[in-house]
Image: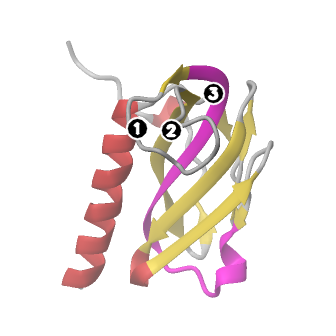
Amino acid sequence: MKSKSFCLAAFFAVGMSSACLAQGLNATQKFTDSEVVFDITGPYSNLTLTISGPNGLHASAHHRTGSPVIDLRKLGTLADGDYLYQLTAATDEKVPDRSGLDNGRDGGPATSRLKDVSTSGQFQVKGGSIVKHDPAEEPKRQK
């Protein structure tokens, strides 16, 4: 149990630190009962979806230009609990590369790279299916 909690905490910490550095990925959840997929709007490439969940579940999918899809049922029986996801991508915007590393290619070190963006969040599985999130059911915060 301690190992599972540590893995989830580590994944969430890495996801949150990455998301804080490069947010801005325009993606809307389009989850089904077992599939994690997003509606992507914008000029993105090299999209990677990573999911972490109970019992050491770790899954990752990549798509060059569209939304990667992970069907959790294909990974076996879905354990009830909290799952974390992170979706990362590159935009067509170039930003200065400050690493200064020579990658061994002609022309010396790269002077720019594509900008990274990401989004992350969580969802729940109950009874073997993804629980649909209804924003109208969220309690209103008191000011």
Looking at the image, residue 138 sits to the left or right of residue 117; the answer is: left
Q: Amino acid at mark 2?
A: Thr
Q: Is residue 47 magenta?
A: no
Q: Which of marks 1 and 2 precedes in the sequence?
A: 1
**Tag shown at residue 48:** none
Q: Which of marks 3 and 1 precedes in the sequence?
A: 1
- Find residue 131 and report its image quarter: bottom right
Question: At 55% from the left edge and 26% from the top edge, which residue is drawn?
Answer: 112
Mark 2 falls on what kind of element? strand
Q: Which residues are magenta?
A: 71-94
How far across and how far down the image is residue 98, in percent? 39, 29
How far across and how far down the image is residue 128, in percent? 60, 76
Mark 1 falls on what kind of element? helix
Looking at the image, residue 131 sits to the left or right of residue 55; the answer is: right
Identify the residue under disc 3. 26
Q: Which of marks 3 and 2 precedes in the sequence?
A: 3
Q: Amino acid at mark 3?
A: Asn
Question: At 42% from the left edge and 43% from the top edge, which residue is drawn?
Answer: 101
Identify the residue under disc 2. 119
Instruction: Report the quarter where the C terminus lies.
Output: top left
Disc 3 crowd rating (10 Å Cα; few below 14, some 14-19, many 20+) is: some
Q: Is residue 76 magenta?
A: yes
- Residue 139, relative to residue 131: is it above or below? above
Measured in 3D between alpha carbons, the distance from the residue under mark 2 to the one under mark 3, in whole angstroms, is 8 Å
Question: At 33% from the left edge and 53% from the top edge, which residue is drawn?
Answer: 14
How far across and how far down the image is residue 12, in percent? 33, 55
| Labels 2 & 1 near each other (Cβ < 8 A) | yes
Q: Magenta region, mostly helix, strand or loop?
A: strand
